[in-house]
Amino acid sequence: MRPSKYQRPAHLDNPALGGTRLTTSAMIASIAGPDQRTKAAPFGHALVELARTRPDIVGVTADLSKYTDLHLFAKAYPDRFYQMGMAEQVMISTAAGLAREGFTPFATTYAVFAARRAYDFIFMAIAEENLNVKIVCALPGLTTGYGPSHQATEDIAIFRGMPNLTIIDPCDAHEIEQAVPAIAAHRGPVYMRLLRGNVPLVLDEYGYRFELGKAKTIRDGRDVLIISSGLMTMRALEAAKRLEADRIDVAVLHVPTIKPLDVETIEREAARTGRMVIVAENHSVVGGLGEAVAGVLMRAGIHPPSFRQIALPDAFLDAGALPTLHDRYGISTDAMVASIKSWL
């Protein structure tokens, strides 16, 4: 049994007290809205397609192929799939060995297990040797309702200090499909946060193309600049459309590559006069994109009129239904709109 401080608050299961009963669907809940376009398992399908012409690509997992969409690869290429059981350290060591033999392993698990349980193995066996391993992890940030044991709210903070490691945080299904071949072509270790299952489609409407290491302006605006990554770019675009009604003009700069950061683009966009700068991320306020951007601005001597963060608190978060939790912790579209209005 988990320690008492991790026990699910009783009121969250009691509708009379404003709670929503947690069901198993909270583990794999989609972040898509009820009327939003989605695409099923974009990572799994993209990897299967890429592997047709890349016989070096292999799949490795720690008993979570179904919940990282790697089961599609396992079905298509059973002789190139390795199931390591519930042992993330063994999975990482196996991936390192495969990379040393010339393969390109895609190792999948939950983000909490890679960041917390397998960190030293990734550091010593993969990053220090600069091996060609792609670590693709589901349930990043607050994308599950199962509480701190499964919510990887600090994974970017853990991995940002690791030399040689590239960190990717895609926004939607469109970007995941493009990121898979891009990270496979990159020589060296990669950690990619994964949105799995039915993943929203957003960026295709903007003619967006993923480029490793590049931040891109999705929408321009004169009053506010939101610098965002992952699912928060989707939320930033939604908030920007709603704020138009209040004559608030919002720009959105999408930063899918957290490391190495596109310093040049961030400096150029943040230096434009008169705009409040807000960093939005599905991660703790500690050690993520917000602090990375703040460091860029400090070193460049750039001083926007105001600098704010929309991020998860430095705390162990509750369990519950995702829409409720996103509202509670300030990363829903409604919460973003309210925060921006209050800051202006």
Image: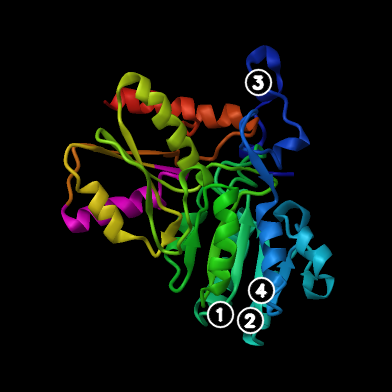
Please report the bounds of the magenta region as a residue range. Answer: 280-301
- N-terminal of the pair, mark 4 or mark 3, is 3
Q: Which residue is mark 1?
A: 131
Q: Nearer the viewer, residue 198 or 156?
A: 198
Q: Is residue 35 above or below residue 193?
A: above
**Distance CA(mark 3)–CA(mark 1):** 46 Å
Task: Tell me the crowding category of disc 2: few under 14, some 14 to 19, or many 20 or more residues within 10 angstroms, Cα based.
Answer: many
- Tag shown at residue 19: 3
**Distance CA(mark 1)–CA(mark 2):** 6 Å
Q: Position of residue 145 (x, y in %)?
A: 65, 37
Q: Nearer the viewer, residue 104 or 113?
A: 104
Q: Is residue 127 left or right of residue 99?
A: left
At 38% from the left edge and 52% from the top edge, which residue is drawn? 216
Q: Which residue is mark 2?
A: 99
Q: Which residue is mark 4?
A: 105
Q: Which secondary structure, mark 3?
A: loop
Say which quarter of the image contains residue 6. Answer: top right
Three-letter amino acid code of the residue under disc 2:
Ala
